[in-house]
Amino acid sequence: MTYQAYLDGISAGVIKLSHTQKLQLAWELCCRLSPLYQTFQDKENWGNSSLLAHVRNAAENFLAGQTNQSLPAEAEIEKITPDTEDFGSTLGSHALDTAISHIYLSRLCTYDSPEALISILSICFDVLDRFEQQFTGISDAKFTNAEMKWQFTVLSKRTEDKDFTLSYVVESDEIIHAALKEYE
């Protein structure tokens, strides 16, 4: 599958989701990316993972029906988004992707944006692709294929059942954790 076919596939699935379903999936994806930012912060002594946690907590509260949540301004999140020129490691790139995903999550708290969820989904794919490219030299696509399958499955199940609330966070975390473990 080409990258464009992947993007077309997730776009077609995202468009069919309700705003609440988009927000829930974006929240789950940001939860699974957050350990990457925390690892970066611990290693580099730079960043603010609590600000990203604030965004996730606000999103969780929005999902629970508490619409009077305050969100950090995008400019605040941008301030804790690492510049890859300053932090050239792969971990810096993962932290950058995590912070950007939280900006998109914040946008989804405010308004329905299919593009925001599509961006977060593609960031998750890119994180795993980066692992494979860095550590294997030539990707066998083991983890990116697992990620694509997981994303298409979740989008399909949520599209078929509008009341679908079963979280796939554990299964999706296993993909990232397996990649991290294999490439440590």
Image (cartoon, rainbow, N blue to C red):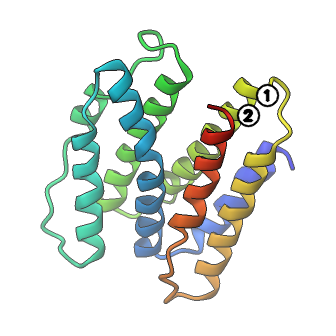
Image position, residue 77 (x, y; %): 27, 35
Marks 2 & 1, CB-CB < 8 Å contact: yes
- Residue 132, label in figure: 2
Answer left or right for 32 relative to 47. Answer: right
Residue 139 vertical position relative to residue 151 in the rendered view, above or below? above
| Residue plotted at (29% across, 22% down) | 46
| Residue plotted at (53% across, 17% down) | 89
Answer left or right for 149 relative to 154. Answer: right
Image position, residue 97 (x, y; %): 48, 35
Image position, residue 23 (x, y; %): 41, 66
Residue 163 vertical position relative to residue 122 in the rendered view, above or below? below
Name the element at disc 1. Answer: helix
**Amino acid beneath label 2:** Glu
Which residue carries the number 1 mark? 136
| Residue plotted at (37% across, 46% down) | 102
On the question of residue 166 being in view, the answer is: yes
Answer left or right for 43 relative to 97. Answer: left
**Amino acid beneath label 1:** Thr
Front-most of residues 139 and 14: 139
Image position, residue 15 (x, y; %): 58, 68
Q: Which residue is the extreme one toward the top? A: 85
Residue 31 vertical position relative to residue 33 in the rendered view, above or below? below
Question: Disc 2 versus disc 1: distance between alpha carbons?
Answer: 6 Å
| Residue plotted at (18% across, 71% down) | 67
